[in-house]
Image (spheres, rainbow, N blue to C red):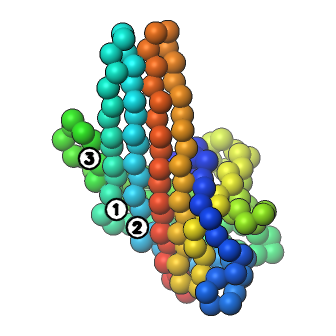
Amino acid sequence: MLILCLCLYACSSDEASDGQTAEENIVGLWKGSDVVFTIQTDFLQNGNSFSRTCTSNYIDSDYFIEFMTDPMTFDSNGDFFVETICDDLDPYFEEFSLFGDGQWSFVDSELQFTAAQEEPQGITVAITYQEIDSDTIILGSERVQNFEDGPNSAQAVFTVEVELIRQN
C-alpha cells in the first residue's frame, strides 16, 4: 500500500541481460530481499526552518508477490521488517507491506499496478523499473509532497528502492 502512494521512477530497457523481455521475466513468485526507504523533510514553522531525515533499512522479510498472466494479475502477502532511524529520534522497528492484490501491465517501459481490494481501490501507480531479469526485480522511486497549514509548511521527498528475488 505504501508504494501505491508513491510515484515511482527509474530507467530500464525492455530487454534484460538474459535476452528475455521484462514482460517474460516478471511472471512467477518473488520474495522481498531488500528495501531502503528515506524521507527528507524540510519544515518552515513560525518563520524558522529545519530539516529531518528518516531512513528505514531492511532487516528481514516474509513478503511475497506473484505475477501471473491470463489475466495479468498479482497477489502479495507478508511484510518487510525495517529499522527506522531519524535525525533526532531513537531508532525504532516497523513492518509494512507493498502493492496488495490487483492487475499489472507494462506501458512504455513502465510497470503499472492497479489495486484491486486495498484502499484506494482501483488506483493505478506507474513504476519505471530499474531491473527486471530472470532472478531479480529492482524498483526505485522518488516523490515530492508539499504540505501547507497557514504560515507553516513542509516539503517531503520520499525515496524507496525495493529488491525482489525469484522463488520459482
Amino acid type shown at disc 1: Tyr
**Who's the residue at 61% across and 86% down the image?**
17
Q: Which mark is residue 58?
A: 1
- Residue, disc 3: 85
Quarter holding the C terminus is bottom right
**Who's the residue at 74% across and 46% down the image?**
122
**Who's the residue at 54% across and 54% down the image?**
141
Q: CA distance from mark 1 to mark 3?
A: 12 Å
**Who's the residue at 32% across and 57% down the image?**
57
Q: Is residue 27 visible?
A: no
Q: Camera-side residue: 156 or 102? A: 156
Q: Is residue 69 above or below residue 140?
A: below
Q: Is residue 78 left or right of residue 27?
A: left
Q: Residues within 10 Å of mark 1 (few under 14, many from 20)?
A: some
First in sequence, mark 1 or 3: give its number: 1
Q: Residues within 10 Å of mark 2 (few under 14, many from 20)?
A: some
* Mark 1 element type: strand
Residue 24 screen position, x and y as percent? 71, 82
Quarter of the rendering containing residue 89: top left
